[in-house]
Image (cartoon, grey):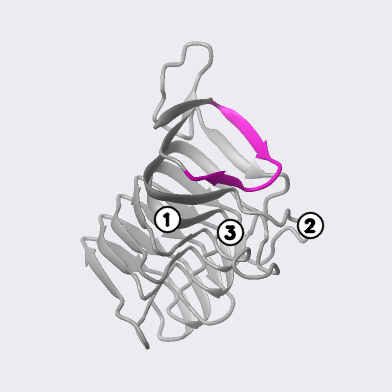
């Protein structure tokens, strides 16, 4: 697929970016040298909606743009995104399925995220990222300060969705204001490997402050290795 090299800076998207083909997006380049710097905090690239939600732990921007940033619908293809920050808006009040995946929706294909920060977005389900009928790998990344009004404040893994590898990453300070899964919610999907990662300081107003594995009608699974789950809060059933 094509390769897009993005310079450091803020790129404002007028609406969601639909990706339906194999592509690689690498941020953090320092134009004009095009020598990559793989430390996002130094030469970082931000993809965001016009006005991100910007959740601060108690409130967010009431005038946030009603749009996510990326919609990955790439059947049989692989999309690679690295060295960027992604900030979505508030899509929680839109009609389904426009209301899921506050920053990123993955509905077909494989998405690989490496050195990616997802933050400051709000959705009905999957405040940061929603994965269903697709595969995702998340490494060296952070999902923080995202909100769902129903399930999965940070990550939602749904029907036939899977995260093959979630490693060396942090899921923190995300919030679910209704059913559960402040950090991660899994229902009918799988996380094959969650390793060397931290799930902390997430909040749910009902079940599972850190992680909620829900399997009422379909099988769900998660395999956790050498990771820290701490400081999460919920009305029922804690971490």
Rendered position, 199 above or below 47: below
Q: Nearer the viewer, residue 100 or 78?
A: 78
Q: Nearer the viewer, mark 2 or mark 1?
A: 1
Specify the farthest residue to the left: 225
Residue under label 1:
108
Q: Is residue 113 visible?
A: no
CB atoms at circles 2 and 1 under 8 Å apart?
A: no
Residue range (magenta): 7-20
Residue 129 horizontal side relative to residue 224, left or right:
right
Residue 56 horizontal side relative to residue 104, left or right:
right
Q: Position of residue 93 (x, y in %)?
A: 70, 69
Specify the farthest residue to the right: 63
> Callout 2: helix, strand or loop?
loop
Residue 120 horizontal side relative to residue 203, left or right:
right
Is residue 4 within the magenta segment?
no
Alpha carbon of mark 3 to alpha carbon of mark 1: how far? 17 Å
Rendered position, 63 above or below 11: below
State the image quarter where residue 191 is shown: bottom left
State the image quarter where residue 219 is shown: bottom left
Q: Main secondary structure of the magenta part?
A: strand
Q: Earlier in the sequence, mark 2 or mark 3?
A: 2
Residue under label 3:
102
């Amino acid at each position: 697929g094509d390769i897009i090299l993005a310079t450091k800076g803020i790129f404002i998207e007028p609406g969601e970016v639909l990706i339906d083909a194999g592509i690689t997006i690498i941020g953090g380049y320092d134009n004009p040298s095009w020598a990559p710097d793989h430390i996002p905090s130094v030469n970082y690239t931000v993809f965001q909606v016009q006005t991100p939600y910007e959740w601060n732990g108690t409130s967010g921007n009431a005038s946030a743009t009603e749009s996510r940033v990326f919609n990955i619908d790439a059947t049989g293809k692989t999309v690679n995104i690295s060295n960027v920050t992604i900030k979505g808006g508030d899509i929680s009040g839109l009609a389904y399925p426009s209301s899921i995946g506050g920053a990123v929706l993955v509905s077909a294909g494989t998405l690989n995220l490496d050195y990616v920060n997802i933050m400051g977005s709000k959705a009905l389900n999957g405040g940061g990222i929603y994965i269903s009928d697709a595969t995702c790998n998340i490494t060296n990344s952070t999902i923080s300060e995202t909100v769902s009004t129903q399930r999965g404040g940070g990550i939602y893994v749904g029907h036939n969705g899977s995260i093959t590898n979630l490693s060396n990453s942090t899921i923190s300070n995300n919030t679910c204001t209704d059913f559960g899964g402040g950090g991660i919610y899994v229902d009918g999907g799988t996380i094959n490997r969650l390793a060397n990662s931290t799930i902390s300081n997430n909040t749910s107003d009902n079940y599972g402050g850190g992680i909620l594995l829900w399997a009422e009608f379909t099988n769900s699974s998660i395999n956790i290795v050498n990771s820290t789950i701490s400081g999460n809060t919920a009305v029922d059933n804690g971490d």
